[in-house]
């Protein structure tokens, strides 16, 4: 069962910006499942009015899509399923766009899942990260699927392993529910954290978090 916190993504984006968010993370969930961007008009409107950088993932499977998203103002493009199914695309994208490309690794029990978490694979998250580093990737987002949206706690051990394996900036996601979680992730060396549900449920106050933890 899905929970809808708002039917106006642009209004929500403006709210987080006004509260001081240093960066906005957007996922086209329809695109992640279908394999192509499904909400381009909404994404374009968000990118147009944001004063802060916007990164986007979900359904990005071609150079044409990457170019289109960067053209409309998206700052960073997240590649997930493509990292597993089309590593040559990742290599090409990194060569062309450098820091604008992030690989998102979504893992269930340490193994990568793709297509909006619908398809399981036999690839370990750390192995994929290593091959993507060799392909030129400079930054990762690591999401523990079992923890995502649960408001329990992040998989700290897995995040630490990903940081140790890649020796590159890693943004943590999944299960973050308190300021203490953010402080632990910072101690572990995470470059940043993606906070979703905890903001909507007010388990984390964004202004307080930004005061106590220096965002990157």
Image (cartoon, rainbow, N blue to C red):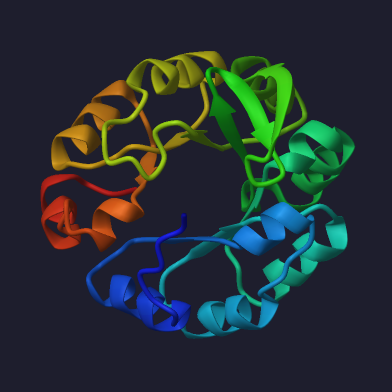
Q: Is any atom of residue 21 visible in this view?
A: yes
Q: Nearer the viewer, residue 201 or 2?
A: 2
Q: Residue at x 18, y 45 (%)?
A: 213
Residue 206 image offset from top left, x and y in percent? 20, 59
On the image, which quarter does residue 202 sit in? bottom left
Q: Residue at x 57, y 63 (%)?
A: 75
On the image, which quarter does residue 21 sit in? bottom left
Q: In this image, 199 relative to 8: left or right?
A: left
Residue 16 image offset from top left, x and y in percent? 31, 70
On the image, which quarter does residue 66 sit in? bottom right
Residue 201 image offset from top left, x and y in percent? 22, 58
Q: Residue at x 52, y 79 (%)?
A: 46
Q: Residue at x 36, y 54 (%)?
A: 196
Taking 201 as reference, is 143 above or below it? above
Q: Is any atom of residue 59 visible in this view?
A: no
Q: In this image, 61 relative to 129: left or right?
A: right
Q: In this image, 213 relative to 160: left or right?
A: left
Q: How many marks?
A: 0
Residue 65 image offset from top left, x and y in percent? 80, 64
Q: Nearer the viewer, residue 81 or 95?
A: 81
Taking 124 as reference, is 103 above or below it? below
Taking 3 as reference, is 128 above or below it? above
Q: In this image, 131 relative to 87: left or right?
A: left
Taking 106 as reference, is 199 above or below it? below
Specify the farthest residue to the front: 1
């Amino acid at each position: 069962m899905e929970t809808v916190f708002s039917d106006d993504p642009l209004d929500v984006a403006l709210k987080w910006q006004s509260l001081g968010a240093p960066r906005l993370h957007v996922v086209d969930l329809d695109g992640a499942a279908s394999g192509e961007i499904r909400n381009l008009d909404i994404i374009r409107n968000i990118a147009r009015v944001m004063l802060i950088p916007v990164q986007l993932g979900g359904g990005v499977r071609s150079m044409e899509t990457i170019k289109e998203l960067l053209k409309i103002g998206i700052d960073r493009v997240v590649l997930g399923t493509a990292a597993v199914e089309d590593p040559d695309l990742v290599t090409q994208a990194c060569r062309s766009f450098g820091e604008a490309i992030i690989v998102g690794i979504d893992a269930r029990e340490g193994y990568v899942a793709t297509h909006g978490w619908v398809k399981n694979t036999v690839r370990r998250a750390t192995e994929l990260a290593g091959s993507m580093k060799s392909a030129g990737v400079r930054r990762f987002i690591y999401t523990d699927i079992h923890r995502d949206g649960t408001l329990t706690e992040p998989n700290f051990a897995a995040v630490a392993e990903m940081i140790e394996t890649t020796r590159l900036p890693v943004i943590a996601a999944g299960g973050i529910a308190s300021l203490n979680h953010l402080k632990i992730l910072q101690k572990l060396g995470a470059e940043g954290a993606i906070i979703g549900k905890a903001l909507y449920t007010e388990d984390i106050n964004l202004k307080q978090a930004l005061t106590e933890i220096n965002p990157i």
